[in-house]
Amino acid sequence: MVREFETYQSAQTISLRHLLENIQEQLPALADMLQMTAPPLQNNESLLAEAQQLLFQQTLQLKARLDTHQVELASLRQRQDELEERSRTDVLTGLANRSWLEEQMHKRFVLCQQQSRIMSVVFIDLDHFKKLNDQYGHQMGDNVLQKFGKTLQSLVRDGDLAGRWGGEEFLVVLPDEDAQSAQIFAKRIAQRLEKTPMAHDDQEPIHVSVSIGIACLDDGGFGSADELIDAADKSMYFIKHTGRGGIAVYGDRGATVTPIND
């Protein structure tokens, strides 16, 4: 019987019914040789049906466990995505936060260097924001920041990255755009603010203006993303110190001022 079973093992297809029949035929002789009482004969068809039923039940249980694990895995992935999204989002405005802006700026700067591409940075500061907080309160200031964040997000294209740098300062990354295109984008921001109030006080509209600095990767020998951001930041402060409500473009000869209504 052992030799026959080994033959079955080496065969490509094993007939379970044939195997059971052979075992039953040889059980009496084997029991007599071992001086044991042979078990009563079983109905092979019943055994096979019972085995199939058990296999079916095991398969159902295994599928149920797999389905449960799939649901748990999908839930964990969704939770991870939500946590990642929260980790790179500014809670107040819904834009990218500073850490995500810095990370993306460094990656994109390296990519531009490797592929000989350009990139512009637009640095935005809301004018007289401290006075607005002092006059209307910090809740109103938060409302203005939220509305400006939505306004800014509505103006950027797919592939651009808009975020809150801190306080009332915002940063927009424009891949593959030169300073002239970035300046057109900056004018659209300022013009939208002229037409759209960022808040209301007793039904009175509250408008804000912005000071904007622009720096393009091909307008200077920038060695890092930080230097590019710093150039846009300095251009913005140039506007701050010369009256606010304008756009300054960084260049080899320094910043040039563009009035908003040009």
Image: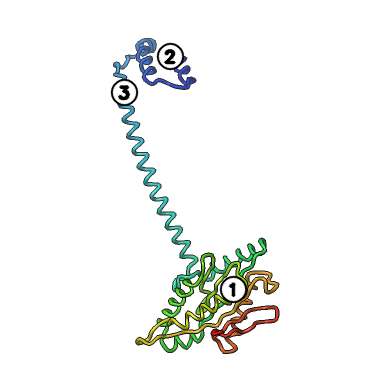
Q: Position of residue 39 (x, y in %)?
A: 31, 17
Q: Which mark is residue 181?
A: 1
Q: Position of residue 235 (x, y in %)?
A: 62, 81
Judge depth for marks 1 and 2 and give the one in front: 1
- The residue indicated by pointer 2 is 1
Please determine whether, in this image, residue 67 is positioned above or below residue 147: above
CA–CA distance in space, label 2 to label 3: 20 Å
The residue at 55%/69% (across/down) is 101
Mark nearest the camera among 2 and 3 is: 3
> Where is residue 57 shown, x and y percent of the image?
32, 34
Helix, strand or loop for disc 3: helix
Where disc 1 sits, the SS reads: helix
Position of residue 207 in the picture relative to residue 172 (left or right): left
Q: Amino acid at mark 3?
A: Leu
Numbered disc 2: secondary structure: loop
C-beta proximity under 8 Å, tags 1 and 2: no
Q: Which residue is mark 3?
A: 47
Q: So how many labels did they put on this image?
A: 3
Q: Residue at x 63, y 66 (%)?
A: 109
Of 217 and 17, nearer the camera is 217
The quadrant the C terminus occupies is: bottom right
Is there CB contact under 8 Å for labels 3 and 1? Answer: no
